[in-house]
Each structure stands twice: as structure tokens, then as C-alpha cells.
Amino acid sequence: MGEVNPDKSVRFVLNGQSLEVPQEKTILQVARDHGCTIPTLCYRDGCRPDGNCRACVVEIENERVLAPSCRRTVSEAMVVWTDSERVQKSRDTVLSLLAMEGGHAEGPTSAAVTESELSKWLDVFDIRPAGSLGRASHTAVDQSHPGFTFDASVCINCDRCVRACQEEQVNGVIGVSGRGAETQIIFGLDDPVADSPCVGCGECVQACPTGALRLPEAVVTDDQKKVDSVCPYCGVGCALTFSVQDDQIIAVEGRDGPANHRRLCVKGRFGFDYIANPNRLTRPLIRRDDVPKDPELLQQAELGQFDWRSVFREATWDEALDMAANGLRHIRDQHGPNALAGFGSAKGSNEEAYLFQKFVRTAFGSNHVDHCTRLCHASSVAALLECIGSGAVSNQVQDILEADVALLIGCNPTVNHPVAATWMKNAADQGTQLIVADPRVTEISRHATDFLQIKPGSDIALVNAMLHVIVNHGLIDESFIERRVGGFDQFKKHIQQFSPDVMSPICGVPVEQIVAAATRYATAERAMIFWGMGVSQHTHGTDNVRALIALAGITGQFGRPGTGLHPLRGQNNVQGASDAGLIPMMFPNYQRVTDPEARGWFESFWGQSLSATAGLTVVEIMSRVEHPETEAERMRGLYVMGENPAMSDPDLTHARSALARLEHLVVQDIFLTETALLADVVLPASAWPEKVGTVTNTDRMVQLGQAAVQPPGGAQADLWIIQQLAKRFGLNWQYAGTYHGVASVFEEMRTAMGSPFAGISWQRLQREQTVVYPCESEDQPGQGVVFIDRFPTESGRMRLVPTDYRGPDVVVDSEYPMAMITGRVLEHWHTGSMTRRASVLHQINPVPVVSMHPEDASAIGVQPNDSTAVLIRSRQGEVTAYVQIDEAVAVGTLFMPFAFYEAAANVLTADKLDPTGKIPEFKHTPVSVQKTTAQPVVSGYAS
């Protein structure tokens, strides 16, 4: 066919109609664009066309053989017929044979088979095949995976699942074995699905056109409805569609949104039945007078089956709201505004975040409002604002497809941002060279050109050494520095002390690897940097990010596709919540509360005087409860919405003690979380699939989510609850409209956000679902790449901030000889309050484990395949967990997820803080480990 020129148009004839179309278009694409009905079974958007099913064949004039329209591109003067007699005969024969091979002619009993694409094509063309070509060797039904079933007897070997697994998710788990009549689809090395390396993303289920891969209990009825929304887990912001029946979500499919293009991970696919968990809060609760707040309550053997009646009593909404507001107001009136604080949530909507921070600032009268950004990327935002004037990403995730090189440091995207990781793996397959730096051998490192296994807490030693190489080898971009960078001369002098020879013993990476990685990054035409909480969650996290910003700055890697900086935001709305002002030192759009002009604007806008003092952060607020400098500075009351500090804060023994000591604690959540167990009043709220609102993902995409189901029982929307409390504080808020005035709240927030949101109206979001900010007018698409000509600083230049190497505040020693790293696992999100109540996710990953290198495990008497538990101790506390022997973990280190309350990793971590970002040290905790006969309790959350 020759070379295809995407800029060239060709004229050809389709079913007698002359058309002019781009040369890169396939016949199938053009035909469908012009209303032609062509069946496809092996074809899938986003995957390479295969043509093996032959259902899509068309007749091309002067060609003897019918051509697969999914593979053939149009060419000049081509004449195509999509429904000729030859085509009809071939199509009907092919569909009949495929139906007979897949057992469709025998009256399929599964709803997934009945409603499959193959069945629908049979109906469209009125084909009624008889008989079966089924193969006896393909009759076994694999039900080993809790999320889906594989029925090989219904398979037609179209290979869509193979390509979805290999090309979209890039997992390479599904393959083909055998030849001819013995050809079959296999998982792993012909393993049961559950025993294969399958990660449970379910992409194969969505791809399957026959129902061979299907949900275990597929039900299809006429009253089923589809609701488009957004995934509420990580910051990728995957568009999805809920299938709803009888007010229950029964299935989830990936939607063709800009962040995911149909792709989902195991949480997005199978993580939503938590909303129907029997432990959902459905009535307001008030603490019984005879039950003191005791943190020992959280040490019960089976928190998942906790009987709330032993601690709380049910109340009406009016009684609970009155008690919540009266208790908080009493503290304010008796002890002043600084005795109150609020923790909002990055799991809620932008509108909820905006209204919550407005409530704290106007009702309480202080700026003591924060959320979990403080525990994940606060150091990143602090450094970005300081150096380039903006706390958001400069380029979007999929820009990596245009990068020559990408540095991935301190991030584990296949676990924490699985769909983002698919684009990274796609890029690597297309030639992008990945430099991966991490203390663990992560899955993404298999795709790396350079893997740099650094010691925990030594990121800045590595990056400063790379900067030394770039400066001293003449690899800087002098033109970019001259035009757009400030402070380079001082920076150049400072970096001389960090040669690879000096830094290599500190970071553990050989000198030659440091030089190679630095050279690779600096000499690339387009290079990106991605980082995660392995960079930010340190007492020197801000310095880590300052160094990464310098790396991009001195090499001129800004302002173009395939360049820039991308801190992978953790929660689904941590970007939006921060933008909306849910942080103690900033109003919405990062206007400092200490700036008289900004404060005056908000005082006029909200009609309320506001505090001129920056508020305290999450850990500082908790510390102020028990350890104030003076009694007058003691924190006495706290309002928590959708946050779980009794699991997410460092040094949980102290954090839980502080929560119990509060004079008045109000918790608004969907479950009786560990934090809620210590509350005076518990307000039952709505889950994400039960509400309407916007979220902002890691790519700066503002996305609209729709309510799929109703909140259970007497649970209420968070917006309604906040407004009811505001009313009891005498605030005369008026938000009219459906869903408690969500559109009105959004438009107010939009005004407060200024020019970045000027072009994003509620009406536009209803039309388009997603708009990228900054977007200054409604006729603009939004800016995916920012800092093209200047940085949003007063001078328009970025600022280089020299950084010194500073290791962890607390180091390993003879008593605590191992370094523990905390983080997430694929199936569970954050503190597990949602995912551990999702049945499929809980079945896949039900128990708390700590990962150890085989040498370390052997040293304490743990052998491979032992069902052994260990006692892990730190200076802060101790927990018991099962051992997972893992060569990906370096000798002398441990990895432990923090989602399991039975073995809460943050019992072990310390509340040492980064001096600028106020973020705790979660990635380096000195611990000791010993074998124990005690067995961790397995949660009953999902029951």
C-alpha cells in the first residue's frame, strides 16, 4: 500500500458516492462515519487492527479477494462496496460459523452471551445459525477470579482480549497457544486466571465480543440504566459508565474520556459495591453519655464487625446537626477561633471542598483548614509555587507519548496510577526511553532503559549528582537559561559539591549509571519528569522537588509537548481541593491569606471578615490538641469531612490520643471509620456515585460526575450537610437549584478562581463533561501545556533554589536496623475505608503483609512459602503482619501498605515534618522485625 501521509487527502468512491477523506483513514472508519453498517468482532478502537474475524470484509473494485475494512486504508480512486452480494454472502457465512463455534446457535443461557456483540450482529442481519462447532477441549469455565469468569466454550479466538491486555493495558498476561483447531486463549502459562499474573483490570471483559469473558453474575433487564461519571479513586480521572439496576451499580465500563480512553484498573472496574455495604452509615449518631472517647477502642480484634450501638445512639438530623453546631460554636465563643479546625477531603467534589473551606473560614473564623494533600504532595506544591509560580502540572500524562525521555522517580504508577502507567508503557514500546529511580524494583522498571535503585531517602543525592553532570559536561540549555531562568550563577557554584563520586555512596547508584542517566535526560529533545510520593513524603521533600525543577529548568524542558513536570497527584480530587482553597495558607486559586489585597477581595465576596493569619496544617493541628505552647493555643474542636486521620496521620498512637482528647469532634463520612469511632457526632454522608459535582484530575482536567444511585436510608449529600451547619452558625447562604445548589456553588467557586476557570461554566461542563484549566474563555479548549512563553511569576522567570543533601531525620541503628517504606497496593486505596468494603478487591487482597527481601527474611527464620507473621517495631509503636518475600525490595528495607487497620503502618511512622511543606516522613522509618507466633486478624469489612 506504500507510505500513508496523514496530511494528504484522497478521493475515492464508497457505495457509489464520491468522497474526499484523509489518507490515514481506514475503509471501516470512513464507512461508519457515513452511516454504513459493517459488523466487526476482532476490531477494537485503540488496538492495532487484526482482521482475523473476516466479518468486516468489503468489496474493492478490481480486487479478487474481499478486503478486511478494519485494516485497509483508503487510496486514490479506490471504489468500495460495503453491501454487495459477495459481501453479504461472506458476512452471513462468517457470522454463522463464528456463532456456531462460540455456542450461540445452541441458545446461550448467560445474559452476557445473549447481549454480546456477536449476538447483536446476528440480530442485525437476521442470521439464525444451527448446530455447533464447539470444541470439547474448550468447555471448562474458569471461575477462579472473583471479578470475572472465563468461559472458553464461547470464545471465537478473535484475540481482542489479547490485544487489550498487551497493547492497551500492556500487561502481557493473555496470550494464544496451540494451532489450528487447538488454538486457545490462555492466561499466563495456561494458568487459572487467579493464579496468573492478571492484575484484574477487566479490560479483556470489556473487549470481549462474545461473553466468553464476563462478569460472574451478568444480569440484563429492560430497566437497566447507564450513567456517565468519573472514577473516584486515584488522580488519573478515568471516565466511566455505571450500569444501574434497582438503584444498585451492577457493572462498570470504561468510557472514552480524555484521560483514559476506555481504560480502567481493578478499582475502577470492580471497586463500587462498597456503596451497598451493610455497614454504610444511614442515620446520624450521637455518642452515648456513658461511653468515654478511648483510643483503645480502635485496638479491638474485629473492627470490621463493630457494633456501633455499644458506643453511639441514633438521632434525628435536627438533633445531630444542632449538637454538632452547638458544640463547635461553644468552643469558638469560649476559647476563640483558633481553638477550632476542619479537615476536608480530596475524595469529594470541588464544590464540597470550596464550601467546606468557606465554612471553616467564615463560621469558625480561622484558617485552620486542611486535607490529605498535606500528607502526599504538599512539599511538591510548596516547591512548585516557590520556583515557577504554579502548583499544578505543566504537562499532561499522555504527553509522554511525545517525549524522547522520561524520568520517573519515587513513583510506582502501575500500582498508584495504573491507567497512567499504561500510557507510560505504551510510550516505552514506541521508543520513549524511561529512566526509573526507586528503592524498589517496581513493575514499571521492567520497561526502563535505566533503572536506578536508590537508597530510601537519598533522592536529592541522586538528582544533585545528575545536575552536577549536566552543568559540568556542558549539557545545559544556555538560551533557555538566559531567557527564562533566574539564579543560575549561584546555582552553578552550589552544585559543584555534589559530584557523582561523592553522591554515589550516599544514594547507592554507581557513578556510571548516574552519568548515563543525566546525559540521557539532558540530551533529549523532549524530556519529562514524573514523580510521586516517594519524592514528596520526606522531611526534605520540598528540597527533592526543588532539585527536580532545576533539572528541567537548566535543560530547557518546559513549554512544549513531551516536556515539563508532572507530580502524579494521589487522590481523585487532591488537585481540585487544593485549587478550591482547602489548605490553611491559601484562599481559592492559591491567593495567600496573608495578602491584604487577596483577603480584602474575599471579605467583600463572602461578606465576612477573615483571619489574616495562616492556619495550621494537619499534623500541626493534631499536635496542638495535646501539646500546645500555651493553654490558650490548645485545639479543642474539629470538624472532619471524608478524612480518616486515625489511619492516615503519622504516629497514630499520638494522633488517636489527640482525637480522643478533643472536646468536640464532628465526623461526616459514609462509614464508621476509625476516626468516626472517636467522634461526638457522626453525620452520614453520600458516596461519590450518589452525588453530582466536579473533580479536577492530575492533568488539570475539570470533570463532571453524575449521580448514579440514591444515598441509602437517611444519609445526606455533603453539600446539604455543610449548608445546614452554616445555617446554624448564622450564615445566610443561598444556593438554589437541584442537588443542593451544586451548580450555584460551582459558579461561585468559578468566580473565586479567577481567570484559570473563566472559560469553564457549569453549562459547558454539562455539554462537554471535561474541560482543562487554565481556560480563560468559553471558546478556548483549555491549555494542556502551560509555561509556553513565561512562568506565572512576577518576573516571568523560574527561580532556581540550590539544595543541600539532607538525609532522613531519623536513621537506622542497631536497635532499629531496617528502613520501612509505606505506600499503597493495587487493590486498596488510601486507608481502605472504601476498597476494603468492596467485595472483589477484598477477596483479591484480604490480609496485611510486609514485603521483605529473601536475605532479610531468612535472617529472622522466615522461609519462602511460610505462612509466617512478624512483629514490626519502631520508636513509635508496633504492629503484626504476614511476610511476603519479595526480591523487588532491597536488602535492609521493608515495604508496608497503610490500608490495613489490623496492621496500621502509621502506628510505626513518626510525625517529623518537612519545614516548608509540613509533610511527614512516610518513606523512611527505622524499624526492627522479628518472627512471631501471633497472627494478624483478617478484616470482615467486606462481609
Image (spheres, rainbow, N blue to C red):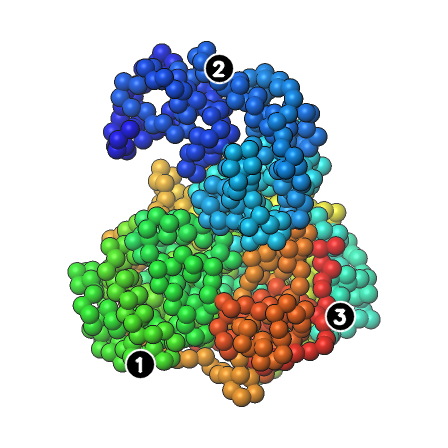
Rendered location of residue 144, percent (x, y): 67, 48
Label 3 sits on a secondary structure element that is loop
Q: Is residue 299 above or below residue 759?
A: below
Q: Quadrant of residue 874?
A: bottom right
Rendered location of residue 313, percent (x, y): 80, 61
Residue named by callout 2: 88
* Badge nearest the viewer, 1 or 3: 1
Q: Is residue 73 above or below residue 641?
A: above
Q: 803 and 146: which one is in front?
A: 146
Q: Which numbered disc, 2 or 3, marks the residue that appears first in the sequence?
A: 2
- At 59% across and 28% down in the image, what residue appears? 101
Label 2 sits on a secondary structure element that is helix
In the rendered structure, are the residues bearing label 1 and label 3 in contact, judged by CB atoms less than 8 Å apart?
A: no
Residue projecting furthest to the bottom: 814
- Relative horizontal placement of residue 927, taking residue 289 as reference (left or right): left
As shown in the figure, which amino acid type bears the numbered disc 3?
A: Gln
Residue named by callout 3: 300
Q: CA distance from mark 1 to mark 3?
A: 50 Å
Q: Residues within 10 Å of mark 2 (few under 14, many from 20)?
A: some
Residue named by callout 1: 502
- At 65% across and 78% down in the image, what residue appears? 931
Q: Which numbered disc, 1 or 2, marks the residue that appears first in the sequence?
A: 2
* Residue 494 appearing in the image: no
